[in-house]
């Protein structure tokens, strides 16, 4: 853990108020959601269960929490008010972990869990459980001589929490695959039987499922989305990159598409409709509507703060687009681009409007895929702005989307492997194996 990172005992958060950035109370914390993992790996704190004034309980991801201090939680102000539903790999801290009997690794003594603490991982937005506050004795409240002693131990010092190493249920398999990249997990799901694939996909949280769907073949995407509850499907579509979500919606029957759009947040639905208005293999059809947009009076420091967002892909983080207000796409007049390398060379107080690269003509939304690919190859770009006739920035095309549409339709069916380099002992260098997967198939219990 980073030095100085505060440790938070989770029972202290019970009942505290949750505020939006304007200081208005939106609800109170009623529980906290952690995801257990296989073996001795500590759980991740996923978010908070917040009770609104209407008594509805919703899920607030930690990625939308900006501050936890002075008996209050401050959010980004973006809340999904759909009712909280617990996933198979998730556990409620107050409802399921506290008062639980676990065993100390050193000595095998049973103890009662009174609290758990979390710290934020350095240079990341993730929170991880690190300590457990326990009481010795046969039951909580045993204060006989020699009993009732309390102590705080590392998570790894107790057993009785984690999922079984060799379990066959969806929760154990998902916990095993948690460390995989989205593309690798997509490959695992693709090779599972349809019933098992749907079970595993439904157990993923919305953001993780969105990332995986973006890496799956079209048929798998439609199949998985069709087996989710409609409100959940709308949530997952909102969590996907707008261009990928628009492509998936375009492949659905008209009635299903309209029903899902009606369940989405109006702003997200508007983005989807705008993207679907363009031909798929054009700059407009390929672009994302969420690039980094700054006004010309923003500073290099402002730009770097936006680039540091861990949720951005490397391609989108490679440059910022400078425009007149409004800042959301379609923006005001597009002025130019500032590349990441230029941001590193100039002082933090420099205005981005003074270091623009405005030599390259932006892409037209109707530019065909071959023209877009030629632009990227000619100018060695990883992302490019898309601007309409009025001069407004509509979005940005990234190189990964260009490649995705230029490869054969069945490219995801091909097993891509790195060439094995000879090792010093004459063998081959180690390539990490995917747990439970061999020769393109996943082991599973049915």
Image (cartoon, rainbow, N blue to C red):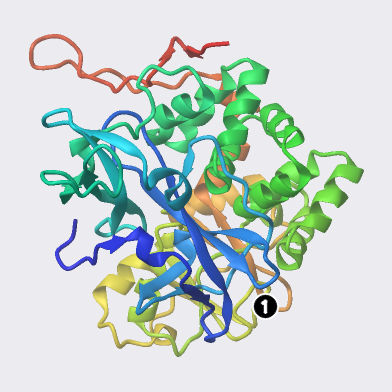
The quarter in which the N terminus is drawn is bottom left
Asked whether the viewer can see residue 386, the reply is: no
Q: Is residue 437 left or right of residue 87?
A: left
Q: Position of residue 12 (x, y in %)?
A: 36, 66
Q: Residue at x 70, y 61 (%)?
A: 365
| Mark 1 Cα-neighbour bin, 10 Å: few <14, some 14–19, many ≥20 | some
Asked whether the viewer can see residue 276, the reply is: yes
Q: Position of residue 40 (x, y in %)?
A: 26, 33
Q: Residue at x 29, y 23 (%)?
A: 432
Q: Nearer the viewer, residue 275 or 39?
A: 39
Q: Is residue 279 left or right of residue 82?
A: right
Q: Is residue 358 above or below residue 289?
A: below
**Which element carries disc 1, helix, strand or loop?**
loop
Q: Nearer the viewer, residue 388 or 351?
A: 351
Q: Position of residue 94 (x, y in %)?
A: 44, 52
Q: Is residue 61 left or right of residue 210?
A: left
Q: Is residue 403 above or below residue 176?
A: below
Which residue bears the numbered disc 1?
391
């Amino acid at each position: 853990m980073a030095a100085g990172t505060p440790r938070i005992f989770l029972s202290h958060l019970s009942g505290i108020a949750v505020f939006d950035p304007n200081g208005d109370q939106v609800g109170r914390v009623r529980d906290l959601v952690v995801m257990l993992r296989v073996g001795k790996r500590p759980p991740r704190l996923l978010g908070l269960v917040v009770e609104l004034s209407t008594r509805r309980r919703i899920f607030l991801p930690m990625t939308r929490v900006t501050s936890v201090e002075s008996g209050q939680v401050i959010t980004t102000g973006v809340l999904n008010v759909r009712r909280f539903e617990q996933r198979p790999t998730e556990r409620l801290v107050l409802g399921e972990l506290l008062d639980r009997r676990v065993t100390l690794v050193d000595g095998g003594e049973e103890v009662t869990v009174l609290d758990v603490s979390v710290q934020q991982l350095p240079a990341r937005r993730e929170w991880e459980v690190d300590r457990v506050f326990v009481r010795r004795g046969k039951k909580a409240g045993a204060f006989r001589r020699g009993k009732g002693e309390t102590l705080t131990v590392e998570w790894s010092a107790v057993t009785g929490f984690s999922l079984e190493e060799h379990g066959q249920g969806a929760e154990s398999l998902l916990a095993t695959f948690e460390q995989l990249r989205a593309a690798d997990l997509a490959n695992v799901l693709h090779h599972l039987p349809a019933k098992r694939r749907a079970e595993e996909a439904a157990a993923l949280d919305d953001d993780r499922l969105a990332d995986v769907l973006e890496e799956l073949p079209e048929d798998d995407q439609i199949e998985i989305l069709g087996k989710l509850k409609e409100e959940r499907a709308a949530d997952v579509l909102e969590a996907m990159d707008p261009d990928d979500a628009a492509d998936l919606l375009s492949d659905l029957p008209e009635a299903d598409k309209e029903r899902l759009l009606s369940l989405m947040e109006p702003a997200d639905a508007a983005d989807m409709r705008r993207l679907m208005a363009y031909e798929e293999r054009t700059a407009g059809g390929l672009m994302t509507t969420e690039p980094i947009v700054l006004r010309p009076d923003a500073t290099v420091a402002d730009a770097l703060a936006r680039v540091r967002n861990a949720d951005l892909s490397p391609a989108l983080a490679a440059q910022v687009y400078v425009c007149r207000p409004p800042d959301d796409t379609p923006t005001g007049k597009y002025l130019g681009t500032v590349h990441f390398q230029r941001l590193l060379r100039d002082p933090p107080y420099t205005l981005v409007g003074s270091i623009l690269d405005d030599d390259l003509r932006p892409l037209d939304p109707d530019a065909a895929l071959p023209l877009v690919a030629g632009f990227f190859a000619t100018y060695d770009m990883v992302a490019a702005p898309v601007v309409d006739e009025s001069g407004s920035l509509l979005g940005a095309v990234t190189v990964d989307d260009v490649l995705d549409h230029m490869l054969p339709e069945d490219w995801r069916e091909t097993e891509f492997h790195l060439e094995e380099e000879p090792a010093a002992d004459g063998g081959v260098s180690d390539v990490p194996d995917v747990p439970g997967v061999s020769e393109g198939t996943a082991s599973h219990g049915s």
